[in-house]
Image (cartoon, rainbow, N blue to C red):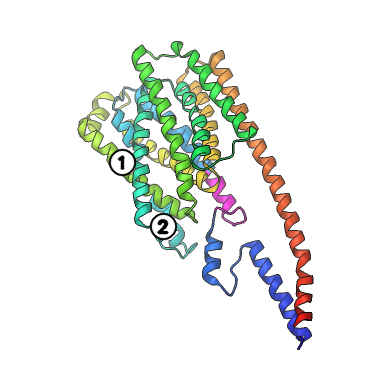
């Protein structure tokens, strides 16, 4: 017996409601549990929180990268000398991560309680990566202590080539002309800089110390480049930004423990007090303002990096972070009156050129994908009415 006209109308309305719900990512009245997961997937560009999160994380990455680098150099420039203190401040701000972890739950933005869905594997991975970050922080401190800001940051841009290689091996990132061109240009900028490195040594820094700083910075870039694709693999099993911050909290605690052990071995926290009062030439007040400021800015840097990898890819996160290094070149010129000769100018132009070409290519690709999705949605909508008619006739 064929259904009545009203039943057919109800079927039509039900199908259109389901399609609309999928399009705007709203919960369906039936499978609530399934829809809650879909709605919470903040990696989807259709999610309402995706674009705001992307913008916020890039702002944090921008402010954190530029400020932390300038402040770290400020410490060594004014007679700060402890590599472990410089390492410790990079991760000691982990309590700040409690804000993005707990605020969404307390403000009723999500029903998910903090540290839900954590398992022993995630804990172990987070601790392992945290130790890796701690070593990376120490290498960065050694590099900054012996190299000018502009030089250390342009050398760090070599991590982008490593990121592409590791991304292709670990996460099967497709190597295209777009990303290969960007990596080649930015890597060339580091090579050109290295060719002129002999004239960049600061007063009091021997040739041996300069080489130590140079290779420590290369090592930091290599380690950080391996960190990005590893985190991309882990984040594939993570569906919300809060969980990313929870993993960051564990990583930063592990890195802080490593740095604390090093500080204790090298004289302990009593050395910080003595250094602030007797060694740092700007006085104890400015010293502790520096400590607090650098703690905050490094957390912004790591939060922004983690968010970019979660919302995009490890390669895109690496490219965004590397492009900001050119801003530090300008910062070294403005704040520390560092030299800006022809080699450094060419390096900066190549770095910016590579980044801008990548961003333009990514924008073009996103426009094409949106147009393709719109066409597919229109085709799907046009096929829905005949399906309803067939259902009415066959029953």
Q: How many marks?
A: 2
- 255 versus 82 height, above or below: below
Whether 347 is among the magenta residues is no
Mark 2 surroundings: few (<14), some (14-19) or many (≥20) residues within 10 A: some
Instruction: Please state the extent of the stretch shown in magenta in the rendering.
Output: 43-57
Residue 131 appears left or right of 22: left
Decide which of tag 2 and tag 1 comes sooner along the chain: 2
- 149 versus 54 height, above or below: above
Can you see residue 95? Answer: no
Residue 365: horizontal and vertical position, in percent? 68, 42
Residue 354 image-quadrant placement: top right
Residue 74 image-quadrant placement: top left
Residue 182 appears left or right of 65: right
Quadrant where the N terminus sits is bottom right
Whether 54 is among the magenta residues is yes
- 58 versus 87 height, above or below: below
């Amino acid at each position: 017996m064929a259904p009545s006209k009203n039943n057919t109308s109800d079927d039509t309305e039900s199908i259109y409601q389901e399609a609309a719900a999928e399009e705007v990512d709203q919960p369906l009245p039936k499978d609530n549990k399934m829809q809650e997961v879909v709605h919470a997937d903040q990696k989807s560009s259709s999610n309402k929180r995706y674009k705001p999160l992307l913008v916020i994380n890039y702002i944090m990455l921008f402010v954190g990268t530029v400020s932390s680098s300038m402040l770290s150099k400020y410490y060594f420039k004014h007679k700060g000398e402890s590599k472990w203190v410089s390492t410790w401040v990079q991760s000691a701000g982990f309590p700040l991560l409690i804000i993005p972890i707990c605020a969404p739950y307390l403000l009723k933005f999500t029903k998910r309680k903090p540290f839900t869905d954590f398992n022993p594997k995630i804990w172990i991975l987070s601790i392992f990566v945290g130790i890796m970050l701690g070593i990376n922080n120490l290498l960065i401190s050694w590099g900054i202590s012996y190299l000018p800001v502009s030089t250390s940051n342009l050398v760090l841009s070599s991590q982008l080539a490593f990121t592409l290689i590791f991304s292709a091996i670990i996460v099967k990132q497709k190597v295209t002309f777009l990303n290969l061109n960007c990596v080649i240009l930015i890597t060339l900028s580091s090579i050109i800089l290295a060719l002129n490195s002999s004239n960049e040594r600061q007063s009091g820094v021997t040739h041996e110390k300069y080489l130590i700083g140079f290779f420590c910075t290369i090592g930091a870039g290599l380690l950080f480049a391996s960190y990005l694709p590893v985190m991309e693999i882990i984040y594939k099993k993570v569906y919300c930004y809060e969980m990313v911050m929870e993993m960051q909290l564990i990583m930063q605690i592990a890195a802080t423990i490593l740095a604390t052990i090093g500080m204790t071995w090298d004289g302990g926290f009593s050395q910080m007090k003595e250094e602030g009062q007797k060694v740092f030439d700007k006085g104890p007040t400015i010293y502790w303002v520096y400590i607090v400021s650098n703690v905050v800015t490094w957390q912004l840097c790591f939060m922004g990096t983690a968010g970019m990898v979660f919302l995009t890819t490890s390669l895109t996160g690496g490219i965004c972070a590397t492009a900001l290094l050119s801003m530090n070149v300008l910062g070294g010129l403005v704040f520390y009156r560092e030299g800006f000769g022809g080699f450094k100018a060419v390096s900066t132009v190549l770095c910016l050129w590579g980044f801008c070409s990548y961003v333009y290519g990514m924008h073009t690709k996103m426009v094409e994908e949106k147009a393709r999705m719109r066409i597919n949605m229109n085709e799907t909508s046009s096929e829905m009415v005949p399906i309803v008619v067939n259902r009415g006739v066959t029953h």
